[in-house]
Image: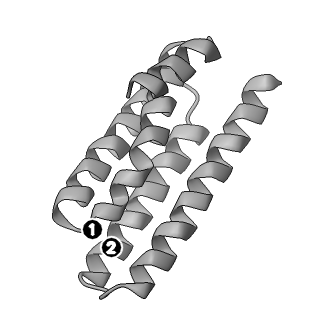
Amino acid sequence: MNQIKMENWIILGKLGILVYCCIKYVEGPMENTAAVIFFILTYVIFNMLAYVLKPLLWKRIMFILSIVLLLFCSVYVNPLFVLFLPMGVSDVVHCTVNDMRFVMVALLVY
């Protein structure tokens, strides 16, 4: 039960970061609009697949793919994508270790 609540908070946090990034992108010069929309949709798809899939290996693969996508996007498309990285790292650590204290320590070290 606690894991479901934690996943809901993580999803809500990602949504908040997504809204913030969209607002900042619209306020800025709006370069590479098609690429930004494509990568946002791809990121959302990877995360939705990670929460829908049952095998832990596939969840890890989807979260790692989303981190690689975020790194690529933050370098080549828009630097705002780097804001999603701490949440992605916490997802990977959470899939690997179920102890939330370790997840918090990993985020602090990151």
> What kind of residue is marked 1?
Asn
Residue bearing the label numbered 1 = 78
46 vs 40: above or below: above
Percent coordinates x, y for residue 81 in the rendering:
35, 58
The foreground one among 61 and 40 is: 40
Residue 14, image x, y percentages: 57, 52
Disc 1 residue crowd, few under 14, some 14–19, many 20+, Cα 10 Å: some
Q: Which residue is rendered at x = 43% and y = 86% of the image? A: 27
Left or right of 51, for residue 28: left
Residue that label 2 marks = 36
Q: Are marks 1 and 2 in contact (CB under 8 Å)?
A: yes
Q: Which residue type carries mark 2?
A: Val
| Image height of 8 relative to 15, above or below | above
- Residue 10 % position (x, y): 63, 42
Where residue 25 appears, as percent x and y from the top left, is 40, 78
- Name the one closer to the observer, 52 or 109: 109
Which of discs 1 and 2 lies nearer the camera? The answer is: 1
Q: CA distance from mark 1 to mark 2?
A: 7 Å
Mark number, residue 30? none
Q: Is residue 82 above or below residue 96?
A: below
Q: Residue furthest left?
A: 76
Residue extending farthest to the front is: 108
Outermost residue toward the right in this view:
1
Say what secondary structure mark 2 lies in.
helix
- In the image, residue 41 above or below residue 105: below
Give whichever of discs 1 and 2 has the lower sequence position.
2
Residue pictured at 47% horizontal, 26% vertical: 108
Residue occupying image coordinates x 58% and y 28%: 54
Q: Can residue 59 be spotted in the picture?
A: no
Q: Is residue 101 left or right of residue 3?
A: left
Residue 11 visible in the picture: yes
